[in-house]
Image: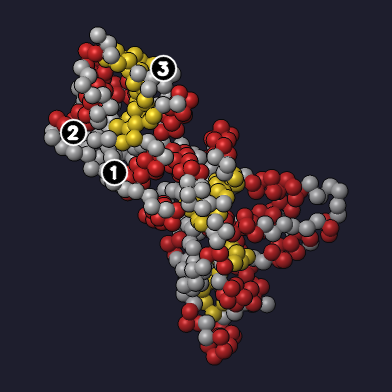
Amino acid sequence: MIKNKIDVSKAFIENILNANDVDNNIKNNDEIFKIIYETLVFDEYLVNVKFEECSFTVNPNLKYQGVIVNNSFLVYFSQILSSDFKTKSRNTFLAQNFYNAFKIAKNKNIQVCVSLNPVSLRLLNKFNLKFTKATPSINNSIAIMKEIGIRFSNSLNSNNTIENLETFIAIKNNLKLKNSKNDSMFIVKTDENNVDIFGTIDGAKWGETFLTCLLLSEKRKAWNIDKINFILYKNNNNRKLSNDKLNILKSFNINIENTYILNSFYKDALKQQNPKPIDEISLKRNQTLFKRKIQQAFNFIKECFACDYSIFDNLIASHIHRFTDIEDEFKKGYISLEEATKNVTDGVNGFLLCPNHDKEFEKGYIYFDIDTLSFKVKKNHKNLLNQSLKLTQFLSSRITKNKIEMLNEQEMDKFRYYVSKHVKRISE
């Protein structure tokens, strides 16, 4: 007698049959149905049910890795483990394809459950082993999913919890610092209880972005968040942006800003060229965008680039090549309005400086030495700074060689150009 109807994702079936890197010895659908059953029983999603009492149907419309049981709950399976039982990728293990499962469950108004991949679970049980999660980011994904109501059980779980917004931000930003070359997201909370999420919607990163934005949206009231901004800071390989994904984030009442905001910024400025003479056209400073792009360029340093000052909201986005000089170059016809606008908001044309060092940098008392990649005091001002302001002892570059070397070749060329402009100005 059939008691349980189980719809199986066709994509999941195909992935299992094509998993050549794991010795799973699974040759057909019936064997896959068997390991799915074993997993559901192990995780207690099925209780006191025999395999013969289950009816399995391959469903081509389920665009995720998993099954739906009796149309009452959905089970999402993790990525299959490698032959040595390690996760192949922190991004693809759980987060990457989760959205499709979440969307189907939401449309059907059913619970989402999560299990370890059935192939991996069978092999672990065969060798009497337990799966040990390899990365903090996977534990973080589990913690986020649990916070938004996703059920975990025996095969895949974590004791990690998220106590508050500050804890969550600290965890996410530590992961970013540990994986600085991985384009992970970075989160900033302002004094106004606004939250800025710097992330991307490309490929494997979409899962992390979706989970983070969903969590912050659902915790908005509990965590006293007034406004959430999502800043798309990289669009890898110049892929066309997915409006569907951006609309999903907008549905969470999240404000979207991205690198392409600059394009509309250029267009607005260029519209001024036809009706007005050049000397009547004014550049826009757009300091908020400029400050964010400095953060993006230099891997989200949150303290003064020249000292230990760390009150982020008080840091000033200081132009290396001054706004007034860029504007002057445009007025004289040396550069186009589009180029001038780009230079004004170019992240590598700026430092985040405390109020003191902002003044010193503007006046030319200190400068950035491109050869040593460090801040230095200008020789003819050393006595002034040593005897009067005593700032020399506090001058220490927080913008390290390592941070600068993360710039690509084009960004580094622009950075050198801007620094040379500053050095030339203060030397005249």
Q: Residue at x 66, y 73 (%)?
A: 425
The answer to which of 227 and 21 lies nearer the viewer is 227
Q: What is the quadrant of the C terminus in the image? A: bottom right
Task: Give the mark nearer the N terminus: 3 vs 1.
Answer: 3
C-alpha gap between disc 1 and disc 2: 18 Å
| Closer to the eye: label 3 or 1 | 1
C-alpha gap between disc 2 and disc 3: 29 Å
Name the residue type under label 3: Pro
Name the residue type under label 2: Leu
Regarding residue 13, the answer to whether it shows in the image is yes
The answer to which of 317 and 312 lies nearer the viewer is 312
Q: Secondary structure at mark 3?
A: loop
Q: Could you tell me residue 230's position as x and y percent?
A: 55, 47
In the picture, the disc for residue 60 is 3
Q: Secondary structure at mark 2?
A: helix
Q: Secondary structure at mark 1?
A: loop
